[in-house]
Image: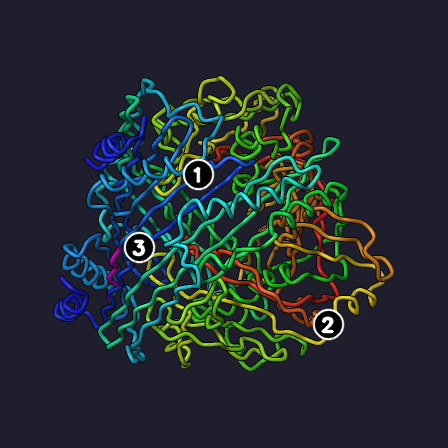
Amino acid sequence: MDLEDAVSLGLDEGADFIEVREERTYMTMIRMIDGVVRELNRGREFRISVRALYRGGWGFGIANSPNEIADAVKDAVSLAKLSSRWAEPIEVNWPSFKGSYEVKGRKPAWQIPIEEKIGIVEEQDRLAKSVEKVTNRNIMMGDTLRETRVINSLGTDIRQTLPRIRLAAYIFAHEAGVTESAFESRGGIGGLEVVEGTGIAEEAAKRAVEALSAKPAPPGPHPAILDPKLAGVFIHEAFGHAAEGDAVVNNESILTGKLGEKVGSEVVSVVDDPTIEGLYGFYRYDDEGTESRRKYIVKEGILSGYMTNLETASKLGIEPTGNARSMDYSNPPIVRMSNTFIDRGDWTFEEMLSDMKRGIYAFGSLYGYTDPAKGQFMFKAEGGWLIENGELKQRLREVAITGMTLEVLNNMDAVGKDLSHDPGMCGKMGQWVPVTTGAPHVRVSRLVFGGR
Amino acid sequence: MLREEAVKAALSSGAEEAEAFELFTREISIHVEKGKVKTASSVRMVGLGVRAAMGKKLGFAFATNPTSGVEVGREAAENSKAAPEDPDFGGLPDARKVDYLSELMDPKLRDLDLNEAADLFLAAVESARLSDKVISVSGKLEVSFSKVAVFSSKGVDALEERTYLIAYIEAASKDGDRRGSGFGFADGRRLDMFDPEKVGREAGDLAIRTLDATTIGVEELPVVFQPKAQFTLIPFLVGQAANAENLQYGRSFLTNRIGDQIAREEVSIVDDGRIPWLPGSSSFDAEGIPTGRTYVIENGVFKSPIHNWYTAMKEGVESTGNASRDHTRPPAISSHTVSIEAPSLQMKKDELLDVKRGVLVVYTMDTPNLSTGEFSGMAETAFLIESGEVTKSLRQTSMGFRIEDFLKTMDAVGDDVETLMGFKGGSVRVKIKVAGPGA
């Protein structure tokens, strides 16, 4: 059965709306430890998913081959009918989209011989090995080619092909009974050219060695400067998740009902932009087929938008922003971020530093999370420096930073000119999707550090 | 069968040894938003991961929903030809006799249909609505039935059926400008391990209790970690710090420390892959090696790492049966169910709270640093203890400590044993530094 017939069958079965998504993914993963290839892995995945809506209830089913589509459609519609027993009706007044988009990349990773890819990994390993005191080198390179088609009963028909690649280095150094580590990665949409010629392993190696002399951070509240990686994760975790349409609609976000209100200092603007070609969180069409677009979430301190899928946009009475994404087609799309960043300001890092008598410069991001309902967040910095009289005095170890989202946005008093982006994976409800976090250096008048 | 086809194809493509890991999963789920069923879902998936070896060269390939195992087997063999040699690779696992556990697959869970699942889960949702202050309840119930098989040219031929359930409920609360949240969750391999009323009530109760919040400054205090606040800490000690790969590459703070005292002598920490009905249990690991019970810390002394076949061969010891994987990656190492054994420190749950001033941590998501063994993280859900009473909820509370100090200052272990997310144990009380923005 083809996808068009599947949509017709879904409507015949009584669905108010039906969507069929087909996905083919091809992947390569190379993992090298201390110069030895420990994983050389190639794989492929194929899925067709069907999502049906009936009187406000959603049903979701999977076909593992074209022969199973009819069964998947019937499953999805009957599951939607089951859900509708408890659901509130949803008006299907959503827009539709048609189009296709393909990124090939200058050096398509899928067509490159495996030996050449191993060569790139080996080069990173050599760079890390050349740094004294390095004791363990872990280099990973993964590329995927994802071909998708989304059609639905409103007339949407989208085809999209996106190649993604990421090179990462996790380096350990040791001296006098102390072991430290650092992580660095590059990634984006495109071919091998995205990761060629980078020095990530050397950067990580030098930071791991530098950390050997680090001390635990002084616990408690401090003025802080956050580097672009950390500020990027902050805005993603602490603010971005609270601006996702599902949390807002469900009244599970501190931003519910605050559109147009001041939520941060006027130096802060926050953008979500899936359309920046090359970045790891890029896509032209989201997983419901909606054309993606750039939008301000915060403009000069005022909450100016939410990120939405078709359903939450309709419930909020705004245009869909193209933020419906799924990890793969075994999962229904949910509202997610893409390339989310604090827009550039007009400070230099040196200006921020010279202004600070005592505080902490925190850099690098290990991970973070938030509770949008309480507005409380945590993000973990790879390290930091104690600042005294405008100078970086003492290197600090990995440290947790906690705060309340709206307080911190209001306490952000300087935003740098040096916007940069960093690839990563974001998890929500068990689904992981590629995203980019980004920011310039920012200064916050007070953040709580969890040192010892 | 896919796995046999794949192994045969790898061997006929030039591989000297081959192994296939095959996973069939059928999963149903109910996703609730704002108290209503949002999506009912039914998913089936077949995964095949193949390792092929040629001398000291190892290749891997996988496919999700393949129609045949032949192509995957061939590709693994081709990858082994392209791979550089690994001097430490000592061959794919040999066959070992597996003593099959019978408490891994619950027919009631396997046969649960979506109507029953929805009714069960909505009972939990309803239980969370303890007052009008609970403004939203969301969550998800996932139930799966899987068949896991490992087959190899070295004689490994293991197959078993497992069921699994995980449920979580999140409740959001509001009272004027004050906001709170709470959660409850449960996991297990048997249907009756999910008590909907208990999980829902726990989420609703926390949501209401976190409305009344305060902050503290920097203090060194007795801190009680409830079981849900330990599953990112104690299993980390075994799954990461005592993971043989991390030890062999010198990544872990426990490197070269076998025989060292790292906890007080009353404390032992054990990994067990054979506790009936727990999610961490299975008859065999992801390489077909029988699971077992490993004392990682015994009487406070670091005694043994956990191994898969590769790391065990490298050291010339037996695998502890801790290989883990999905079908898309080669085997890694992870813990099964980790528990604290400290009978001489045991006391009643409420007795742990008998301190003048302290903190009760209900939940943290953070883990210690692998290299330094230091923890810096947030007490995501926590309360102040004043004169033995749990009082206000705490916000922005960070904690900083060395995991060894955590294990050495532990002066009480509660009888409130819970099992969840690969951890089994009661509350523990330690003395550590906490930091907030100030009272």
Residue type pointed to by label 3: Ser
Residue type pointed to by label 1: Glu
Q: Nearer the viewer, mark 2 or mark 1?
A: 1
The crowding category of the residue bearing disc 3, from other C-alpha atoms within 10 Å (few below 14, some 14 to 19, many at least 20), is many
Query: Which residue in the structure is indicated by mark 1?
Result: A39
Measured from the top left, where is residue A420 in percent x and y?
61, 66
The reply to whether label 2 and label 1 mark residues of one chain is: yes
In the picture, the quarter occupied by the N terminus of chain B is top left
What is the distance, in whole Å, between disc 2 and disc 1 at their CAs?
46 Å
The crowding category of the residue bearing disc 1, from other C-alpha atoms within 10 Å (few below 14, some 14 to 19, many at least 20), is many
**Residue at (19, 57) in percent of width and height:** A72
Measured from the top left, where is residue A315 in percent x and y?
38, 76
Measured from the top left, where is residue B14 in percent x and y?
29, 31
Earlier in the chain: of badge 2 and badge 1, it is 1
Left or right, B167 with reference to B369: left
Measured from the top left, where is residue A29 in percent x and y?
43, 46
Question: Magenta span covers which residues?
Answer: A47-54
Query: Which residue in the structure is indicated by mark 3?
Result: A330
Q: Secondary structure at mark 1?
A: strand
Among the 4 quarters of the image, the one containing residue A205: top right
* Dot 3: chain letter: A
Q: Nearer the viewer, mark 1 or mark 3?
A: 1
Residue B438 visible in image: no
Earlier in the chain: of badge 2 and badge 3, it is 3
Q: Secondary structure at mark 3?
A: loop
Among the 4 quarters of the image, the one containing residue B393: bottom right
Earlier in the chain: of badge 1 and badge 3, it is 1
In the picture, the quarter occupied by the C terminus of chain B is bottom right
Q: Which mark is residue A413?
A: 2
